[in-house]
């Protein structure tokens, strides 16, 4: 990747946007990205200034944190909401890196596979956050691996053991606190033995104070039923209590709060919405063939007494859980367009809203990759609220650490 392509990525520009902002043709932009001709110095200078302007303020955050298995930065946003400053990011997927880079201009590279990074090469930090890979523990992941005759949980050599990279970094750096996220089923995987190992490692072997983890439903904050287990820990015992986490009334927000209004009250965006009224692009409407298949599939399973089928929503609904497979057919969350009309999929922008990302969050990747990324993300408001309750205890432990170092 040449400098021009890196700068484009950090600026979050598409080729068309770069052409408009820099004053050159799209043909020039494509050739410069591919390294087929020298980049005009004026274009490079303009891009450097743009990226420099996106850099976060140099003022110190109230505490530092590292973002592991970062995805597109959901846990980062939670920690930044209470004054945290990210000093290290690890994410192996190149498309997630692209989205992360477009939204967080750290002026430092994103580290790749965490299992290949030595703990001593990671900066000193006050908090570790990680949404460690959940496939070995999730219901869908376990079922798939069982069907294939493959090991799962801590016996899975490709993903299950990545939790131990979290452990070795905690052991080396001894940060004041950590926040971990995973699927609800982590607690019951392998009849509870997997979760027992996790707790024993964190509490007994590393000596962290770990309050009983909690499962929180994002429906308290967003119009989506999404249960995730939240694990927090502190270097010493502190009066942290999950009871202090303030959960708004479940269902206060409904799908109308995240759907495109299609009435001209928002500007058209890319290929998501078009025209003066910013109506949803027809490309998101299900074809007759796909809609017929999903209806027949649902009817077949209903006749067998199974609960499988599509999830149809309207403005008053709370949706099912957005998953990383949403790009395939969108069946878990289909937006009704009225009687006699085929429903549509959510646009990537609506998926971003459903996960709590702000309107200015850039989506520089294809729809397929965007659906995967938002489906794998955390619901930001859930973890921002947990971070709010954690913050005073982080400060207290950080202060104690600083005093002990002076002594």
Image (cartoon, helix red, strand yellow):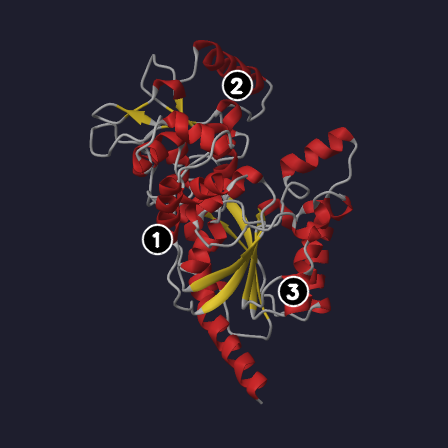
Q: Secondary structure at mark 2?
A: helix
Q: Secondary structure at mark 3?
A: helix
In percent of the image, x 33 and y 42: which residue is there? Answer: 359
Q: Secondary structure at mark 1?
A: helix
Residue matched to label 2 = 298
Mark pair 3, 1: CA separation: 34 Å
Mark pair 2, 3: CA separation: 46 Å
Mark pair 2, 1: CA separation: 51 Å
Q: Nearer the viewer, residue 227 or 72?
A: 72
Task: Tell me whether circle 3 and circle 1 mark residues in contact (CB < 8 Å).
Answer: no
Q: Is residue 60 something that shows in the picture?
A: yes
Residue matched to label 3 = 170
Q: Position of residue 156 (x, y in %)?
A: 75, 43
Circle nearer the viewer, 2 or 1: 1
Q: Position of residue 141 (x, y in %)?
A: 66, 36
Precedes in sequence: disc 2 or disc 1: 1
Question: For the N terminus, which image quadrant?
Answer: top right
Label 2: how many Cα within 10 Å (few below 14, some 14–19, many 20+): some
In percent of the image, x 48 and y 31: which residue is there? Answer: 37
Q: Position of residue 2 (x, y in %)?
A: 52, 40
Label 1: how many Cα within 10 Å (few below 14, some 14–19, many 20+): few
Precedes in sequence: disc 2 or disc 3: 3
Q: Nearer the viewer, residue 98 or 258?
A: 98
Image disc number at residue 13: none
Q: Is residue 377 above or below residue 38?
A: below
Relative to 362, is 226 on the left or the right?
right
Q: Position of residue 379 (x, y in %)?
A: 45, 47
Residue matched to label 1 = 53
Precedes in sequence: disc 3 or disc 1: 1
């Amino acid at each position: 990747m040449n400098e021009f392509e890196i700068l484009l990525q950090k600026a979050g520009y598409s080729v068309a946007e770069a052409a408009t902002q820099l004053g050159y043709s799209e043909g020039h932009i494509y050739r410069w990205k591919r390294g087929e001709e020298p980049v005009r110095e004026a274009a490079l200078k303009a891009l450097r200034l743009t990226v420099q302007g996106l850099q976060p303020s140099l003022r110190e955050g109230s505490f530092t944190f590292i973002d592991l298995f970062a995805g597109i930065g959901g846990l980062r946003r939670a920690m930044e909401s209470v004054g945290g400053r990210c000093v290290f990011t690890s994410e192996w997927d190149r498309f997630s890196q692209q989205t992360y880079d477009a939204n967080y201009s750290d002026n430092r590279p994103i580290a790749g596979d965490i299992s290949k990074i030595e703990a001593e090469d990671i900066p000193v930090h006050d908090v570790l956050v990680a949404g460690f890979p959940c496939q070995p523990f999730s219901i869908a992941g376990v079922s798939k691996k069982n069907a294939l005759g493959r090991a799962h949980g801590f016996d899975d050599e490709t993903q299950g053991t990545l939790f131990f990279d979290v452990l070795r970094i905690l052991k080396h750096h001894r940060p004041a606190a950590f926040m971990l996220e995973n699927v609800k089923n982590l607690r019951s995987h392998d009849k509870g033995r997997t979760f027992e190992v996790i707790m024993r490692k964190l509490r007994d072997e590393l000596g962290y104070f770990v309050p009983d983890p909690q499962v929180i439903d994002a429906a308290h904050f967003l119009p989506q039923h999404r249960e995730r287990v939240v694990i927090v820990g502190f270097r010493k015992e502190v009066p942290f209590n999950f009871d202090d986490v303030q959960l708004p009334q479940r269902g206060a927000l409904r799908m109308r709060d995240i759907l495109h209004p299609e009435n001209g009250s928002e500007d058209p965006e890319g290929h998501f919405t078009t025209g003066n009224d910013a109506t949803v692009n027809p490309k998101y409407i299900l074809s007759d063939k796909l809609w017929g298949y999903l209806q027949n599939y649902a009817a077949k399973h209903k006749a067998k007494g199974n609960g499988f089928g599509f999830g149809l929503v309207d403005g008053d609904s709370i949706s099912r859980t957005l998953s990383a497979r949403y790009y395939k057919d969108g069946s878990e969350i289909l937006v009704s367009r009225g009687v006699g009309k085929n429903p549509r999929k959510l646009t990537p922008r609506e998926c971003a809203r459903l996960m709590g990302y702000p309107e200015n969050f850039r989506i520089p990747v294809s729809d397929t990759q965007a659906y995967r990324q938002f489906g794998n993300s955390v619901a930001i408001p859930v973890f921002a609220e947990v971070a709010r309750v954690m913050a005073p205890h982080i400060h207290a432990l950080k202060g104690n650490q600083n005093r002990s170092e002076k002594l």
